Image (tube, rainbow, N blue to C red):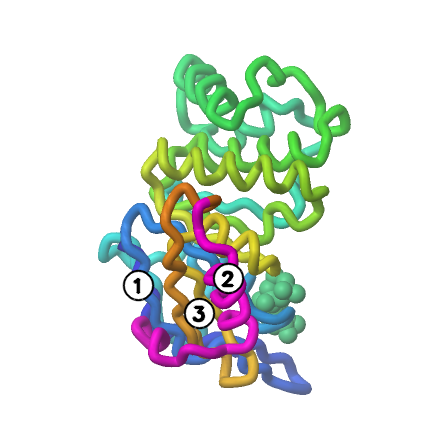
Amino acid sequence: MLNIKNVCKIYKNKDYSQNVLKDINLCIEDQEIISLVGQSGCGKSTLLRIIAGLEKASSGYVELNKNIINKPSSNIGMVFQDARLMPWLNVYDNIKLSILNDDKETQRYKINETLKKVGLEDIGNLWPKQLSGGMAQRVAIARALVQQPQVLLLDEPFSALDSFTKSNLQDHVRHLWSSLKITIVMVTHDINEATAISDRVLILNKVLDNKITKNHIVKINKPRSTFPKNEYNELINNIIFNKNSNQFNALI
Ligand SMILES: Nc1ncnc2c1ncn2[C@@H]1O[C@H](COP(=O)(O)OP(=O)(O)OP(=O)(O)O)[C@@H](O)[C@H]1O
Ligand SMILES: [Mg+2]
């Protein structure tokens, strides 16, 4: 279980201090898939970086299975908005960066298996410039998955992609999630994407001190195409306009 306990983040420099996250409390169960939405600048990426151990909370802490996270670990993989592949390394070597401590044979096995999982067999020799945006994002996902993390953090991973590729990769993420049994926390600006992919949609609210004020449980049965359109629209409406407060606060 991922436990985010009283996390606050204040960015300070000599001229000002900015309170970005305040008293964030959140429990994410193993194998949950959740989306984090909220307006630009409300601290979503900051929270994800803190969970990843890439940034320190000003106070509070994050625990994975009761172990405090204070540095990046192979238990937690992260995918950023842009693929961030090293242009001077081919796909194989880009993925290898995550498992440099393994021996060569294990690396080869893990990299090939992971490329298969993201639907990109036999492209290890290609260079980043030879990849489409969707392929590059899959390689970035492979780089995070190759270390066999328990938790995968996705920071707006599909925002730069066209809607066809995006929808294809969304399906792929759900498929990966169900086959790998990992926990996924995804930041997105796209409410449709959030409700399509996740079990829960959490809203980080900038106006109210950046607390997670709303815990919208996405009650959509699978397959989701059978979900009644009017209920789906109502759900989206509730999320956007912050209604249904009786569903909230379960995680505060
Ligand atoms: N390293 C930093 N130093 C100072 N301020 C920062 C730093 N990183 C982020 N911030 C500030 O913290 C606030 C939250 O930033 P963050 O990137 O977490 O927002 P976000 O919700 O991910 O926004 P977006 O949806 O636009 O990606 C912003 O006002 C930003 O300027
Ligand atoms: Mg961000």
* Residue 83, image quadrant: top right
**Residue 188: image x %, image y %?**
57, 57
- Residue 29 percent coordinates (x, y): 28, 54
As for residue 248 lying within the magenta part, the answer is yes
Mark before the other along the chain sequence, 2 or 1: 1
Q: Amino acid at mark 2?
A: Asn
Q: Is residue 49 visible?
A: no
From the viewer's side, name the closer residue of 55 and 111: 111
> What residue appears at the point 56 percent right and 55 percent down from the top-left corner?
192
The residue under label 1 is which amino acid type?
Cys
Cβ–Cβ below 8 Å for labels 3 and 2? Answer: no
Residue carrying label 2: 230
State yes or no: residue 179 in magenta: no
Q: CA distance from mark 2 to mark 1?
A: 30 Å
Q: Name the spot of residue 46 as percent of width and height, x first.
A: 53, 65
Q: Which residue is mark 1?
A: 27
- Disc number at residue 57? 3
Depth check, front residue: 221 or 25: 221
Q: Position of residue 53 (x, y in %)?
A: 44, 56
- The one of 167 and 20 positioned closer to us in this rendering: 167
